[in-house]
């Protein structure tokens, strides 16, 4: 895997601006597998937290569109992917799905997370990672935001991340229905 092109400072700066009252929408794309490397876990968690805080504090005054990979690309000619990457991918999706379920249960605004579907021969996403903001009636980058929103609006290109992706039943849920009473 080549060195990631994730500019930590730029991501943190944009996430700080996200809290501004003038920002009414955001498009966040995190499809590069570099996000799953251990040294990006802290930044990934900061971004998750920042998006959640903005959504909870700003409620209906902000629209956040987020795109992640639906599944990791198949490794064809590349060396085998480390198992830690697969575990990080599963954990990330599980955590985001759990947060969605918990927010919906308390009538909070649910995160809008779209999972980008790659075809078997696509080694990478056809869209760059980004955080673009609709600030004071204008996108920070019209072309990039438009590309991401176009993919989200293309039938069959993405699928939503929902609570259905999780098994919240627990080990004894089926054996004793009284746990739901």
Image (cartoon, helix red, strand yellow):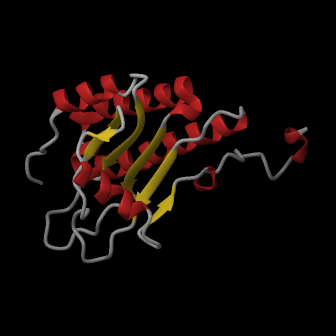
Regarding residue 152, the answer to whether it shows in the image is: yes
How many marks overall? Answer: 0
Residue 1 percent location from the top left of the image: 12, 54
Name the residue rendered at 43%, 58% in the picture: 115
Which corner quadrant of the image does residue 79 belong to? bottom left
Q: Looking at this rendering, what residue extends furthest in the left direction?
A: 3
Left or right, 34 with reference to 165: left
Residue 68, image x and y in percent?
37, 52
Q: Name the residue located 58 percent from the left edge and 34 percent from the top edge.
A: 60
Where residue 155 sits in the image (x, y, percent)? Answer: 47, 72
State the residue at coordinates (55%, 45%).
97
Q: Where 149 sits versus 138, above or below?
A: below
Q: Is residue 70 left or right of residue 169?
A: left
Work out whether residue 80 or residue 18 is closer to the camera in this orientation and state it.
18
Residue shown at 43%/27% (left/top)? 49
92 sits to left or right of 170 = left
> Which residue ends up furthest to the front in the rendered image?
137
Give the camera-side residue of 54 and 83: 54
Query: Within the image, what quadrant is residue 75 found in?
Result: bottom left
User: In which quadrant is the C terminus drawn?
Assistant: top right
Residue 70 appears anywhere in the view: no
């Amino acid at each position: 895997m080549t060195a990631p092109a994730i500019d930590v400072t730029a991501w943190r700066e944009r996430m700080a601006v996200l809290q501004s009252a003038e920002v009414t929408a955001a498009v966040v794309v995190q499809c590069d597998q570099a996000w799953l490397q251990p040294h990006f876990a802290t930044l990934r968690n900061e971004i998750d937290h920042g998006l959640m805080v903005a959504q909870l504090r700003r409620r209906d005054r902000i629209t956040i569109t987020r795109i992640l990979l639906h599944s990791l690309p198949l490794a064809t000619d590349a060396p085998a992917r480390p198992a830690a990457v697969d575990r990080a991918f599963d954990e990330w999706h599980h955590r985001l799905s759990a947060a969605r379920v918990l927010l919906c249960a308390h009538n909070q605004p649910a995160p809008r997370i779209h999972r980008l579907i790659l075809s078997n021969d696509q080694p990478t996403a056809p869209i760059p990672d980004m955080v673009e903001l609709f600030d004071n009636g204008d996108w920070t980058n019209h072309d990039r935001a438009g590309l991401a929103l176009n993919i989200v609006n293309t039938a069959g290109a993405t699928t939503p991340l929902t609570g259905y992706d999780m098994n919240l039943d627990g080990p004894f849920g089926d054996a004793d229905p009284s746990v739901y009473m």
